[in-house]
Amino acid sequence: MDIHAQRILILDFGSQYTQVIARRIREIGVYCEIHSYSMSNQDIQAFAPAGIILSGGPESVTTSHSPRAPEIVLSLGCPVLGICYGMQTIALQLGGKVDPGEKREFGYAQVAIRESSQLFADIEDHLTEDGLSLLDVWMSHGDQVSALPKSFKTIASTRNCPIAGMANEQRKLYGLQFHPEVSHTRQGMRILKRFLFAICGCNANWTAKNIIDEQIAHIHQQVGKNGVILGLSGGVDSSVAAVLLHRAVGDQLTCIFVDTGMLRLHEAEQVQSVFEQHFGIKLICIDARQEFYDALVGINDPETKRKIIGKKFIDVFDQQAEKIENVKWLAQGTIYSDVIESAAVKTGTAHVIKSHHNVGGLPEEMQLKLVEPLRELFKDEVRKIGVELGLPYELVYRHPFPGPGLAIRVLGEIKSEYLNKLRQADAILIEELYKADLYYQVSQAFAVFLPVKSVGVIGDARQYEHVIALRVVETIDFMTAHWARLPHEFLETVSNRIINEVPGISRVTYDISSKPPATIEWE
């Protein structure tokens, strides 16, 4: 089975929800890709989409310089669904009108179904006394379609937006002013399923098992009999990549685990236990702690710390890689979000947030080719693959951990004594979250070491010791986050344990900053 044969093309107009659209389609079981609205007619034709979705966007179609859908989109003959800005550009390009709305709509709205359509058939949240079907949806727009293009009908409306949905069912062209991809639109997934299955004729072939089977076959063909090395960090992406590659090529894979000294408590031992003993993966563990500590002496700036750690990792990794024979491939745990963000400069639709390299970059002298078995997958898909491959649930669903590790959770200069205190405090926080059944209810939790001292009293003695801050957040996409409202009794237990069990800590604080304006990590 070719699980890419039926695929949906998402053209991105710069919406903050574009990746959410893609994740929902993948969840439903259909493969899709995100490309810029500036994709050429030839490339769209070569893509051969089963359907096209036009995303929302921050621009106004009423201005002459704002983006438009490529001409071929509306003449190719495959189904098209325009969402928000996507709906407006369809209307304008086919002869309709778009104007600023009398009232802007942001947030919850109730949409009334006006005419029957394949998109909404038998989908409703409420029925009025006179038999009108209503949907609870999420709006985010200022402009709206004020006049339909020829041969279109109005399929939904609100009090403020007379044309909240439109359709030309003969040409299979649809537009929605609301966002079906967000969880606030209660029937959003059913609407998307209707578009994918009933209108585009797709099947749910994009499953964890099918992805694994296809990737194993692809890796076999790509790698042949040559050796592969992977920098294993113990994080979700590199862990899933390691097990998938091992399933495909067995002992041709060698994983290199570098203990930088910036890891969590007992993390090195856990990596060895899971990958070497449980999965039988060939694993080389390098204790490079002192090298990293020496390189970071006197360094306070967080970005400088990152660069030093990245370069040192490459040096250590490269030295070990050169000792392994017949290695032609370097594997990386690059995922689809990394690919999208790294392509932002080309598309012009977003800023590049960071460069993505699991080992910090590929030294030219290594002369290795890249194999990236996860580069088509979102993080939630990677986790599902990991579970299907037999990785422990607590490893696959553990909270995110930054590439530089604890180096950016010790504020200022790195010292081994600071790291030891932080490790112990962090382990206590995580242990108590598990005990209270809170770990999987929050998105990320960790301790931060503050290089300041505070007066405390332990026993009858005055202490002047360091401070630990606790950071626990709840988020859906990590672009925004709220601090977690944890029970006071829980925070008291964690604080008491840290002060009593971690030498040299006199005070524990709780970070109640949300993102924005704060970031999730302190550095």
Image (spheres, rainbow, N blue to C red):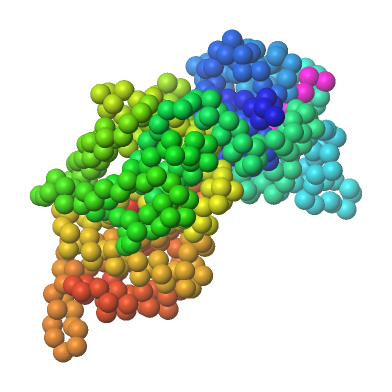
Residue 232 vs 267, above or below: the answer is: above
Pick the front one: 259 or 470: 259
Residue shown at 27%/23% (left/top)? Answer: 364
Was residue 508 drawn as part of the magenta stretch in this picture? no
Magenta residues (range): 170-176
Rendered location of residue 367, percent (x, y): 31, 23
Q: Quadrant of the N terminus?
A: top right
Q: Residue furthest top?
A: 42
Pick the front one: 4 or 68: 4
Residue shown at 42%/38% (left/top)? Answer: 253
Rendered location of residue 10, percent (x, y): 60, 27
Residue 357 vs 504, above or below: the answer is: above
Pick the front one: 166 or 76: 76
Name which quarter of the figure residue 496 lies in: bottom left
Left or right: where does residue 495 sit relative to residue 20?
left
Residue 154 vs 468, above or below: the answer is: above
Name which quarter of the figure residue 355 lies in: top left
The reply to whether residue 312 is in sight is yes
Residue shown at 77%/23% (left/top)? Answer: 172
The reply to whether residue 59 is in sight is no
Pick the front one: 508 or 88: 508
Q: Residue furthest right?
A: 130
Q: Residue furthest bottom?
A: 460
Rendered location of residue 399, percent (x, y): 44, 55
- The number of discs equals 0
Rendered location of residue 343, percent (x, y): 43, 26
Left or right: where does residue 152 sit relative to residue 63?
right
Residue shown at 70%/14% (left/top)? Answer: 76
Left or right: where does residue 128 sit relative to residue 495?
right
